[in-house]
Amino acid sequence: MNTRAEPFLLSPRAYYSPNLCTWCDGCGNYGIWTALKYALVELGLHPWQVCLCYDIGCHGNGSDKLQGYRFHGLHGRVIPFAAGAKLANMKVPVIAFGGDGATFSEGIGHLVHAVRSNYPITFVLHNNENYALTTGQATSLAPQDQPMNTSPNGIPERTLSSMEFVFSLEPTFVARGFSGDIDMMARIFKSAIQHRGFAFVDILQACPTYNKVATHEYLLDRYFDANAEGHDASDVAAARRLATSVQDRIACGILYQREDVPDFYSRLTPRHGLKTTCVDEVHKYDVSQYFGDLV
């Protein structure tokens, strides 16, 4: 039972949608969906004050399961849209969601440049090690020796180490959560949203239909709160060791954070000294005088 207090005049009910959830019973998306609402409410954000961007996948089917400004994009392309939305209006928190398939296959180039550029958005990785929406094909993060629907003998390629990859890009915020721990995820989401640059949040989630190895029980037995055990999130070497050591125990929580690196927007010299946002500067112009030059 969840006993979280609801702030005055704003509760998770503000994000209520009449559309029924259609995820499989036991899917980790339910926990992530719930933790997100708690985090937004605890930050005092109403549905009309935040932009939520979804990639294609099972998680993306949640785009109409809560109120707010929501975008449901193309496979592997949610990060550039989210970055553009944020740069257009820096006053609005922007949160993007993507699966491990879309993010580390089709969209891996966008992830690279999001971390490199330090775009001021939050990115939540729904990590269940398969393309669940299309019936359980292996992703780049699927274990090499794990049988999958379209690869019964396991994948021939090497499994991509997602945390090694992200840390190699010199990130400013890296966290990991578990879909079975709503309180931890809400705490992580709040810190990620308040971070000044690109916040990478890896959520380990169960897929009860297609991933029979990394089950809810498997993850529950192995995850632990690194922050509660005294981890120093400012120590990048320690964070990288914790993030990549997942054989026996899986470290969760805020693994790494630094606030001294300017975000992408603050590096844009033409924006210095301006009090308007980019969307404030959009106007209608009469261009008929130029038509003659084109005919």
Image (cartoon, rainbow, N blue to C red):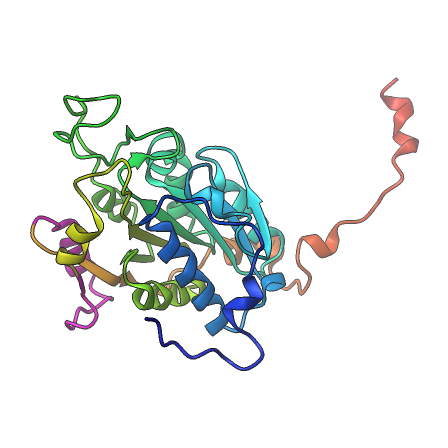
Residue found at the far left of this picture: 248
Q: Residue at x 25, y 25 (%)?
A: 149
Q: Quick check: 198 left or right of 218?
A: right
Q: Residue at x 32, y 68 (%)?
A: 183
Tell me: residue 57, above or below residue 50.
above
Q: Which residues are magenta?
A: 224-247
Tell me: residue 11, above or below residue 102.
below
Whole-percent x, y for residue 180 in the image:
28, 58
Q: Quadrant of the N terminus?
A: bottom left
Q: Quick check: 229 left or right of 67?
A: left
- Is residue 228 highlighted in magenta? yes
- Would residue 249 be visible to someone looking at this image? yes
User: Quarter-wise, where is residue 186 in the image?
Assistant: bottom left
User: Quarter-wise, where is residue 255 in the image?
Assistant: bottom left
Whole-percent x, y for residue 110 in the image:
42, 38
Q: Quick check: 55 left or right of 269?
A: left
Depth check, front residue: 115 or 129:
129
Whole-percent x, y for residue 217 in the image:
17, 53
Tell me: residue 283, above or below residue 228.
above
Depth check, front residue: 145 or 96:
145
Whole-percent x, y for residue 237 in the image:
16, 57
Residue found at the far top of this picture: 295
- Would residue 176 be visible to someone looking at this image? no
Q: Residue at x 56, y 75 (%)?
A: 10
User: Quarter-wise, where is residue 194 in the image?
Assistant: bottom left
Depth check, front residue: 295 or 110:
110
